[in-house]
Amino acid sequence: MIRIDSVTKRYPDGTVAVDNLSLEIPDRSITVFVGPSGCGKTTTLRMINRMIEPSEGTITLDGKDITQQPVNTLRRSMGYVIQNAGLFQHRTIVDNIATVPRLLGWSKDRARARARELMERVGLDGALAKRYPYQLSGGQQQRVGVARALAADPPVLLMDEPFSAVDPVVRKGLQDELLRIQGELGKTIVFVTHDIDEAVKIGTMVAVMRTGGHLAQFAPPAELLSSPADAFVEDFLGADRGIRRLSFFSSAGLDLLTSPVVAVDATAEQIAERGANDVPYLLVIGADGRPLGWSEPGALTAGDIDPSRLLAHGRPFEHGKDSLRAALDCAVLSPTGWAVAVSADGRVAGVVSQQTIGEAIRAAHAEGRTDARDSGDAGDAKVAG
């Protein structure tokens, strides 16, 4: 565990970058520092590995003051990933990743073997090993940066806006990759970003900082979205924080309908039976069970269903894995207003209307309010006892 206790960073000109900050960063979690420019989030990150020394207070790692060990030893025990990867341009990819193991005295063969192993772990093709950074895309370079930070298997990983310089599609892929790697390795990750969506998506805990280096709120993402501490946090979260909160509600409980689903080779009787269920559209699926598109029931003719003439089925969501936010998004973007639910293998599990998703959202919110009341009652009882 990393404990930050009454830490202040004051520069000689009197500027206070971080002001009396205290919090505990849990083991094997992703703790995200987020806030506007100049709020002290990067300064805090750099104080953890002593790239910046605090003016007051203490930072401890597993109960030991970080100032009580040599700074180089401390830094080599922590992976560090920055924006634009910070790679050595004159070294190949495999040797970039092998940098810290080599500094720790590993043999060249052992360090390169570890580097190739990590290339696979972060989703890099092994054929890139002998290339140089300039020959890789921005997203690939960021993956190299993550691999390099993990090379010596450090317990702590510090990440300073590592994905902010890439486009949104690549950024989402890198976020997903980080969550996958964290699920496998269970590092203690401290992550800095200015993007609240990124913080909510990847954070186990989120520290919202305000200008002047003050901590505004430190909470799990769901709590942050449902109960912002003050007007500053509420404004920073944005007007659509209710939509973001849906990311924490599972789609597993959605009542899917299979009656509007019809196979591409369906008979006239099957089409008529499906169309008799008083649904405005039927979803046509292929022989493999995957969605092909929507059609009005009366427009389908047995033996002559042309997939090219169907309405696009839109982006499906994975039932049980994706959230209610994903399901709602699919329904809103669908040309029919209905979302297509698929199983893990991409086969259609059913369809669901916006109305049904709305009912599930209301039920989830009601359950959340009940849980909050129960927690409050339990806390009152504990205090009273």
Image: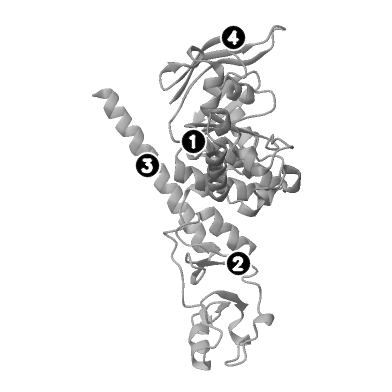
Q: Vertical placement of 75 versus 359: above or below? A: above
Mark pair 2, 1: CA separation: 48 Å
> For residue 255, what is the image quadrant?
bottom left
Dot 2 or dot 3, earlier in sequence: 2
Dot in front, 4 or 3: 4
Q: Residue at 50% across / 71% down in the picture? A: 347
Mark 1 belongs to which amino acid?
Answer: Asp
Observer able to see residue 315: yes
Colouring chosen for the image of the structure: one colour
Q: Find numbered disc 4 in the image and state the secondary structure of the residue it sits on.
A: loop
* Residue 61, image x, y percentages: 45, 21
Mark pair 3, 1: CA separation: 39 Å
Judged left or right of residue 321, residue 86 is: right
Q: Which residue does the numbered mark 2 point to in the structure image?
A: 337
Judged left or right of residue 34, residue 22 is: left
Dot 2 or dot 4, earlier in sequence: 4
* Residue 324, image x, y percentages: 51, 55
Judged left or right of residue 124, residue 383 is: left
For the N terminus, which image quadrant? top left
Mark pair 2, 3: CA separation: 31 Å
Please tell me which residue lies in front, 75 or 98: 98
Q: Which residue does the numbered mark 3 point to in the structure image?
A: 371
Mark 4 belongs to which amino acid?
Answer: Ser
Mark pair 1, 4: CA separation: 30 Å
> For residue 338, what is the image quadrant?
bottom right
Q: Which residue does the numbered mark 4 point to in the structure image?
A: 55
Dot 3 or dot 1, earlier in sequence: 1
Dot 4 or dot 3, earlier in sequence: 4
Dot 1 or dot 4, earlier in sequence: 4
Q: Which residue does the numbered mark 1 point to in the structure image?
A: 153
Q: Are the residues at dot 2 and dot 1 in contact (C-beta closer than 8 Å)?
A: no
